[in-house]
Amino acid sequence: MLNIGDKITSDGMLGIRHAGIYIGAHGDIEHAVVHNSKRDGRVVVEALAAFGPYKLAQTAPAGRGAMVREAALKYVGTGYDLLKFNCEHFASFVQEGTPRSPQLEAGGAALGFLALMGLVLGLAPRGSYDASVDRRRLSNGQFAKKSWLD
């Protein structure tokens, strides 16, 4: 059972999670979610059923559900920005006070690792090619094998 102010997620394509804040009844919607919708390009209020199959990601801080709900509603209409204000940034900001996007952080770390590996591999000594024997000469002066058959 969800409580007002709970952070929920819904799994999307390629394992990407979408986050929102459950706010209970709003207008003529009995169970509503506020989320920053990439599709709509802004923060919207939507029925829980339209948000999709959800999982409870984080309960609202004790006694602060109504405060989280009001904070979420203040951002309705605010624009979507993948790097600075996506659905995770929004949900963590209104619930915890800090805009965070764990998926974006994980993706940035993975890109950083790949860039570092590319740099390391690019700087690795490779020796030089000796055209007279059609082989690469290693940094120790020996010739590299031409193939696994050598």
Image (cartoon, rainbow, N blue to C red):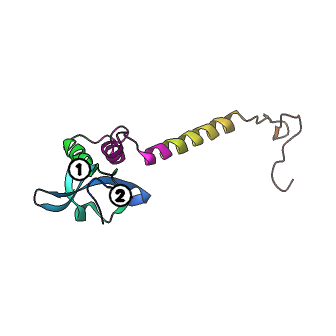
Ranked by sequence position, the earlier of labels 1 and 2 is 2
Amino acid, disc 2: Thr
Read off the residue under disc 1.
66
Q: How many marks?
A: 2
Q: Secondary structure at mark 1?
A: helix
Viewer-proximal residue, 100 or 107?
100
Amino acid, disc 1: Ala
Image position of 136 with respect to 26: above or below: above
| Residue 88 lies in the magenta-colored region | yes
Viewer-proximal residue, 21 or 5?
5
- The residue shown at (30%, 66%) is 1
Viewer-proximal residue, 112 or 74?
74
Viewer-proximal residue, 51 or 64?
64
- Say the numbered circle drawn on residue 9: 2
* Residue projecting furthest to the left: 28
- Say the numbered circle drawn on residue 51: none
Whether residue 12 is visible to the viewer of this picture, yes or no, is: no
Residue 143 appears in which quarter of the rendering?
Answer: top right
- The residue shown at (36%, 60%) is 56
Whether residue 26 is visible to the viewer of this picture, yes or no, is: yes
Q: Along the horizontal axis of the image, is 137 left or right of 36?
A: right
What range of the chain is rendered magenta?
Answer: 80-106
Q: Along the horizontal axis of the image, is 114 left or right of 138?
A: left
Location of residue 114 in the rendering, given as x and y in whole percent from the top left corner? 58, 42
Location of residue 17 in the rendering, given as x and y in whole percent from the top left corner? 39, 56
